[in-house]
Image (cartoon, rainbow, N blue to C red):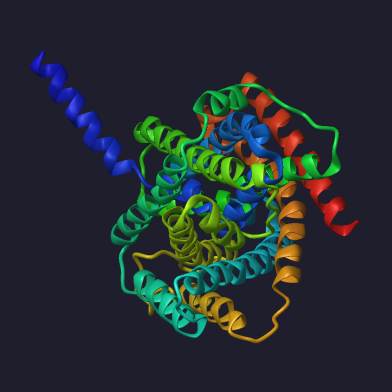
């Protein structure tokens, strides 16, 4: 008995040592754009979209498990593997598209910081510079271990949405039924919201950041089981936050016919209907999520661009050891935060084109991943099995259709 307890304690310590990349990558995808999409889904369609949580969680686990496996077995990031196996031309195209997509997304995160801060009466001309400085110091002055701890702490702020959801006391029986009962409406807006929910949850940058952080953390093949648990936990946290955001807006805004087009509008609309506490919690979640994402997205960009072109990268490195890495990270923050301070910046157009680029890139990244994960020279006995490959191609096919639909709707 004592031996079993001792073994359990050791296993638990290993799990906590490995914990981080999966939950951080999944959680940060609930950024300003994700929160807006979930809020719109609930306000416009009530509980009818809650059933998408289960397939989204499955997709997240399957796609990210492949990243974890590649990162652990090869010890390299995804951009590194793409350069080595597909050459500089394809690498340059993918890196350039990812750079501009993430730059636009970073601008959107700083917009989320500005909007949430102003809900608390703080002008963006104070909130943006302070947030940018905080994010920069966190990464430049930190080590990977300390930065990861800070990111894991930031995940706790998402519980603001859980508290807000509990405060409004929804009909949990109805919520449960909606989660397990698929509902399809033959309506273009409804179908596009489904595409949007998938698109905001499975973003191209996630695959690069997750694998790069796994490689930098130095997780070993014998610890793969624990990294898989990390990914599963991260996916569960993501869909739980998604559930509470949709439930809150579906319970309060949908019955009153309130239509919104952003996360900050959702927070404002909740005030008169659900009380100032619920509104403030919603705004706090938006602020924390936006700051969190404003750190991760530039960091992800610096990782994969430097990997893709063979430059030194990593939070554990000093500025003099990885000048390109830190220069790119700094530039992303300065541009992302600086653009928000420009009066009348066309933010809607920026977000629009970032989604178009995301839609174009996702199928390409997934196909490259499936080639790499099935390359026996790279992966040895860790290649996908037949059943997993079938599942992966079905998921990839579905995501490709969703991406093409998103592009056509945006361009149409």
Q: Quadrant of residue 321?
A: bottom left
Q: Is residue 132 left or right of residue 317?
A: right
Looking at the image, the residue that sits furthest to the left is: 2
User: Vertical placement of 325 versus 177: above or below?
Assistant: below
Residue 8, position in %: x, y?
20, 24
User: Vertical placement of 389 versus 140: above or below?
Assistant: above
User: Vertical placement of 172 versus 297: above or below?
Assistant: above
Q: Residue at x 54, y 57 (%)?
A: 272
User: 27 or 312: which is nearer to us?
Assistant: 27
Residue 29, position in %: x, y?
54, 51
Evaluate whether residue 385 shows in this view.
no
Q: Is residue 155 left or right of residue 79?
A: left
Residue 240, position in %: x, y?
48, 38
Instruction: Please identify the quadrant where the C terminus is shown.
Output: bottom right
Q: Is residue 340 left or right of residue 119?
A: right
Q: Residue at x 57, y 53 (%)?
A: 35
Residue 389, position in %: x, y?
66, 26
Q: Is residue 384 left or right of residue 366?
A: left
Q: Residue at x 33, y 42 (%)?
A: 18
Q: Residue at x 11, y 18 (%)?
A: 3
């Amino acid at each position: 008995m004592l031996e079993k307890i001792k073994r359990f304690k050791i296993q638990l310590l290993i799990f906590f040592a490995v914990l981080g990349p999966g939950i951080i990558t999944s959680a940060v995808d609930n950024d300003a754009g994700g929160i807006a999409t979930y809020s719109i889904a609930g306000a416009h369609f009530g509980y009818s979209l809650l059933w998408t949580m289960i397939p989204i969680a499955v997709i997240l686990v399957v796609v990210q498990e492949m990243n974890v496996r590649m990162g652990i077995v090869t010890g390299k990031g995804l951009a590194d593997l793409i350069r080595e196996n597909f050459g500089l031309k394809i690498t340059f195209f993918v890196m350039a598209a990812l750079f501009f997509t993430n730059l636009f997304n970073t601008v959107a995160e700083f917009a989320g910081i500005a909007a949430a801060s102003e809900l608390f009466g703080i002008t963006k001309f104070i909130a943006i510079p302070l947030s940018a400085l905080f994010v920069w110091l966190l990464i430049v002055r930190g080590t990977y271990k300390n930065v990861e701890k800070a990111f894991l702490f930031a995940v706790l702020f998402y519980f603001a949405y859980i508290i807000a959801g509990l405060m409004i006391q929804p009909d949990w029986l109805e919520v449960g039924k909606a989660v397990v009962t698929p509902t399809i409406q033959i309506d273009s807006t409804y179908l596009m919201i489904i595409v949007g929910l998938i698109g905001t949850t499975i973003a191209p940058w996630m695959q690069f950041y997750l694998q790069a952080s796994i490689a930098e953390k130095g997780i070993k093949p014998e610890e793969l089981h624990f990294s898989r648990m990390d990914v599963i936990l991260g996916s569960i946290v993501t869909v739980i936050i998604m559930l509470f955001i949709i439930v809150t807006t579906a319970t309060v805004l949908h019955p009153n016919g309130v239509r919104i087009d952003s996360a900050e509008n959702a927070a404002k609309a909740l005030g008169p209907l659900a009380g100032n506490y619920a509104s403030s919690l919603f705004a706090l979640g938006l602020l924390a999520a936006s700051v969190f994402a404003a750190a991760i997205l530039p960091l992800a960009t610096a990782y994969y661009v430097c990997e893709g072109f063979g430059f030194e990268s990593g939070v554990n490195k000093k500025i003099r050891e990885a000048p390109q890495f830190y220069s790119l990270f700094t530039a992303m923050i300065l541009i992302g935060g600086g653009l928000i301070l420009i009066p009348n910046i066309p933010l809607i157009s920026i977000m629009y084109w970032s989604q178009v680029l995301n839609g174009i890139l996702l199928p390409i990244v997934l196909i490259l991943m499936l080639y790499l994960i099935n390359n026996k020279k790279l992966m040895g006995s860790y290649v996908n099995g037949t059943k997993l490959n079938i599942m992966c191609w079905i998921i990839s096919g579905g995501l490709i259709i969703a991406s093409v639909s998103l592009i056509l709707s945006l361009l149409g």
